[in-house]
Amino acid sequence: MKKAIYKVPNGKLLKISLEDHDGKIDSIKITGDFFMYPEEHIEKLEASLKGCELLVPALEARLKDFLEKTPTSFFGLDNASLVSTILSAA
Amino acid sequence: MKFRLLKTGFLPGAQNMAIDEAVLENIAKAQSEPTLRFYGWNPPTISIGYFQSLEEEVDLMACKNLGVDTVRRVTGGGAVLHDHEITYSIHIPEALGLVPAGILESYEKICDGVIKGLAVLGEVAPTGRIIGLASPRRLGLEAKFVPLNDLVVMQNGGMKKISGNAQTRKQGILLQHGTILLKVDVDKMFSLLKVPSEKLKGKLIDDVKQRVTSVSLALGREVAFEEAAEALEKGFAQAFPEVSFEDGTLSAEEKNLAEKLVKEKYGAEGWNNAR
């Protein structure tokens, strides 16, 4: 399991644990003391990232697509921090 | 507009969290009134945020040895040791228009109740007698809201955290709960929490000691739970002048649901170890 921890600027602590294979996400767990509404979307977000290439454009696109289809708001967390912390875990 | 005021005493973590959810469910079904609740924790409990991993955040063996309970909250945010403190929860139907729709703005509005309560606390003499406004001896505990969800007071020239707050919204109901430290024991806190680096633990403890205070430290005298509850009740009444807070109790439906939630959710591994 690969891990990364990141303090979001003006935000909260983000922890990423992931397994990858051939440059793609096998499984990912996003934890930390941030807020997300509705909370129950966290598992859906994690599932939506499975199979995603570990590259900035691919992760950004996957996240954008998820948030369009599954309206979710972050508080103390942002897309850029999520993408960069996933990449630093990989 | 009427709100129910609940004082549920000191309860284990699972019960406390189950009551907050049971109250929310019943307000959503229009079977209970909007509610402000004050409570404590017995045994002392570490609550973790919705998105935190219990095993990553908490030294469960140390908790067991010290008789400290653990529970995962329905709200996000960080791990909190509920020991010498008072917790409030407020359930506000969003349709009432009492709080702004924005998350940050609504935190600020509700935290204003705590700020006003802490100011009242400064006006209460140790005997519990309110010193008249004309009194020259107005101590006043001046707290202020610091985004995203903290309250701080000025002490020794620095801003120190005295309260943490967390919010969720479900079924049209805003639930915010928060804790106000009456006493603080940073060493105990860190003996129970896991930190990312053992090597940096000492420095981290020193940092937190610099950044955290309690009502008792800030006021220079011990403040008991009851006194704090009384002050916070007044603070919320000032922050929400359109609301009349009236003493009430849990309904039978709420008690039954809370009991079920203790068994099936907050007291169960499936929920607490979900992340």
Image: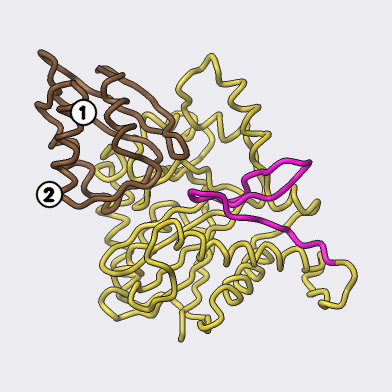
Q: Is residue B199 left or right of residue B157?
A: left
Judge whether residue B141 can be spotted in this image: yes
- Residues B147 and B62: in front is B147
Colour brown maps to chain: A
**Picture quadrant of residue B47:** top left
- Give the residue furthest to the bottom: B1
What are the residue bounds of the magenta stretch?
Answer: B138-163
Q: Is residue B26 above or below residue B67?
A: below
- Residues B111 and B266: in front is B111
Residue name at image x 66 percent, y 43 percent = B160
Q: Quadrant of the C terminus of chain B?
A: top left
Q: Earlier in the sequence, mark 2 or mark 1?
A: 1
Residue name at image x 52 percent, y 52 percent = B42
> Residue B178 location, x and y as percent?
50, 56
- Residues B84 and B216: in front is B216
Q: Colour of chain B?
A: yellow
* Location of mark 2 (residue): A69
Q: Is residue B149 magenta?
A: yes
Q: Which mark is residue A28?
A: 1
Q: Given the image, what chain letter belongs to the residue carrying mark 2?
A: A
Q: Is residue B242 above or below residue A19?
A: below
Q: Given the image, what chain letter belongs to the residue carrying mark 1?
A: A
Q: Kindly state the secondary structure of the residue where label 2 is placed.
A: helix
